[in-house]
Amino acid sequence: MVAGAIVMMFPFLWTVITSITPNGSLSGGPTLFVEHPTLDAYGTLFARLPMARIVLNSLFVALVSTGLQLLTGSMAGYAFARLDFPGKPLVFGLYLATMMIPLQVLVVPLFIEFRDWQLQDTLFALIAPTVASAFGVFLLRQAIQAVPRELDEAATIDGAGHLRIFARIILPLVRPELATVGIFGFMASWNSFLWPLVVIRSPELQTLPLGLATLQGQFTTRWDVVMAGSVVSILPMALVYLLAQRHVIAGVAHTGLK
Amino acid sequence: MKNRRSQAAWAALFLAPSAIPLALFTLWPMVSSIRISFERWNLISAPVFVGPANYVKLLTSPLTAEVFGHTLAYVLGYLPLVYVGGLALALALNAKLPARAFFRAIYFLPVVTSWVVVALVWKWLLNPSNGIVNALLGAVGLPQPGWWTDPNWAMASVVLASAWKDLGFVMVILLAGLQAIPGDVLEAARIDGASTWRTFRHVTLPMLTPSTFFVVVISLIKGFQGFDQVDVMKGGGRQGSSQVAVEQIYDLTFRYGRAGEAAALSWLLFGVILIITAIQLWGQRKWVHYA
C-alpha cells in the first residue's frame, strides 16, 4: 500500500523536483536530490506568460460559474420538487435530455453562436455556457424532495412565501448536495480545455489548461518551465480538494451507488 | 385556483435562471448541429444544404473507421488497467488499514488534476531522451521505447497517463460497492469454510457487479469523448496513430473548414456512444447481480 502510494505520488513529486532543477542540468534528466534548487523556472514562467492574469482568469471563471450553478440549480431543484405547474414532466424531461448531449456535439454550433453575437474571445463566453448544469438540477431536486414537507407547511402557516422557504429552510438542509455540486462545478471549470481552446484567442484571456498547452508549444525543451506551470496549476485545485476531500469522495461514491 | 396560478408563476421564476441558459447554450446548439450536419459550410460563406452527403462521406471514408479504431484501442488498453488496479486498491483499502483516509485521499489526487497537466507531466516522465521512465528502463537493460514520439507507442503513452489519472476514481466507486456488501454474507461464506479466494470469486465479485457495470459504462463513454490528453500528448503530426474522434471534429471545423462534416461526425460519435451504452444496458442482466 505504501509502495503503491509512492508510485502514485511520484509523478507529482517529479513535477515539483523538475520545476526547481536548474535548466542546465536537465539534459540528463533531473535527480531526486537537487543540488542547487532554483526558482528560475517560475521567474521565466511569469515573465514569458501573463501568468498572474491567467491564474486570476481561471479563478474568476471557476468561482462565478460555480456560484451561478449552485443558484440556478437549487432554484430549479426547488421548482421541480415543490411547485406544481403545467407541463412539469415535459420540462423535467428536457432538462434531463440536455445532460445526455456531449460537449463535442455542441462545440461547433456554440462557437458559431458566440461568433455571431461577436462575443467570442471574452470571459463571458467561457462562463455563460456553464451557468446552469442539468446534473446539478437533478441532484438538488433529489435532495430537496428528501426534505420533509412538514417543514415548508409549518413555515407557510407562519406566513413565509416561497422565497423565504427556499432560502431559509431548504438551502441550509441540502448543504451536502450543494457542496457536491459546487465541487464538481469548480473542478469542471478549472480543468476545462476544449471549449476555452475553441473560443479564446487572446493570451490575456486564457485559463490555466489553455495557457499550459500554449506554454508547452513555446518551450518544447524547457521542461522545468512547463513543470513550474503545472505546479502553479495543480496547487489551487489540490488545496480545494484537500479542504473538501470528504465531500468530493463521498460525492463520487454516491453517483456510483445510484 | 389562485394558488395554482401563483405556483406556476413562482415556478417560472425559479426555473428561468437555468432554463434560459440551457435553452441558449445546449438545446439551441443541438438543433443547429443537426441542421449543420446536413450542410456544406466553411464557417464563412453561406451554408449549402447537401442532404445526407456528409454522413455518407463519413461512413464510406476509411479515415472514420481508423479514428474510431484508435478510440477503441484506447478504451481496450485503458479499461483493464484501471479496473484491475482500482479493484486491487479498493480491496486493500477495504481491509482495516491504518491511515486509510490518508491513502484514499492520495490515490484520488490525480482525479482532480486537469487532463492537460496530467498529459504534460506524463510527457515529461515518458520523454524518450531524458525522461525518468526510460532512464530506469535503461538502467535495468530493457528497451527504451520512443513513447509519444513513436506512432506505435503513442496510444500506449496516452493509456498509461489516463489510467494513472482515473485509478482513484475507479477505486472510490469500487470501494463504495465493497462497503455496501453486507458483513453477514461474507461471514456466512467464512463459516461454511470457503477460502479467501473462493469468497472473493463467488461472493465479493458477483456482489460488486453493479459497481463494475457503472465503471465500465462510464469509462466507455468518457473514453469515446476523450480529447484533452490525446491532444496534448501527441508528438509529431496530428494524423498520427492516436487521432481520436473529437480531435477529428475539431480539425474538420477549425483547420479544414468543413463544419458540416464535423457536425455529422459529432452525431455519429453520439450514436456510437448511445449504441454501446444500450448494448451494455441490455447485456447487463446476463452478468450484473442486483441484490
Image (tube, rainbow, N blue to C red):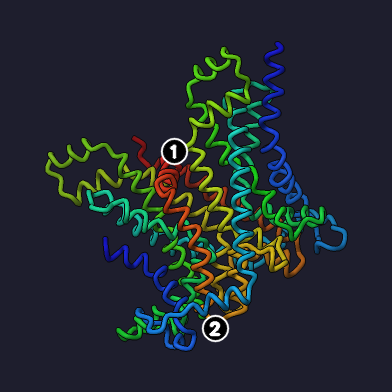
Q: Is residue B66 visible?
A: no
Chain letter, disc 1 residue:
A
Q: Nearer the viewer, mark 1 or mark 2?
A: 2
Q: Position of residue B199 (x, y in %)?
A: 21, 46
The residue sitting at 53% across, 43% down in the picture is A181
Q: Residue at x 62, y 62 (%)?
A: A207
Q: Quadrant of the N terminus of chain B?
A: top right
* B50 displayed left or right of A31: right
Q: At which x and y percent is residue A60?
A: 63, 54
Q: Neighbour class for label 2 at 10 Å: few (<14), some, many (≥20)?
A: few
Residue type at mark 2 is Thr
Instruction: Name the residue furthest right.
Output: B46
Element carrying mark 1: loop
What residue is pinned by disc 1? Answer: A258
Q: Is A250 placed above or below B116 here?
A: above
* Residue A18 pos. (x, y %): 44, 77
Return the chain for callout 2.
A
Question: Which residue is denoted by mark 2 in the rendering?
Answer: A221
Q: Quadrant of residue B208?
A: top left
User: Residue type at mark 1?
Assistant: Lys
Tell me where residue B100 appears, x and y as whole percent: 28, 52
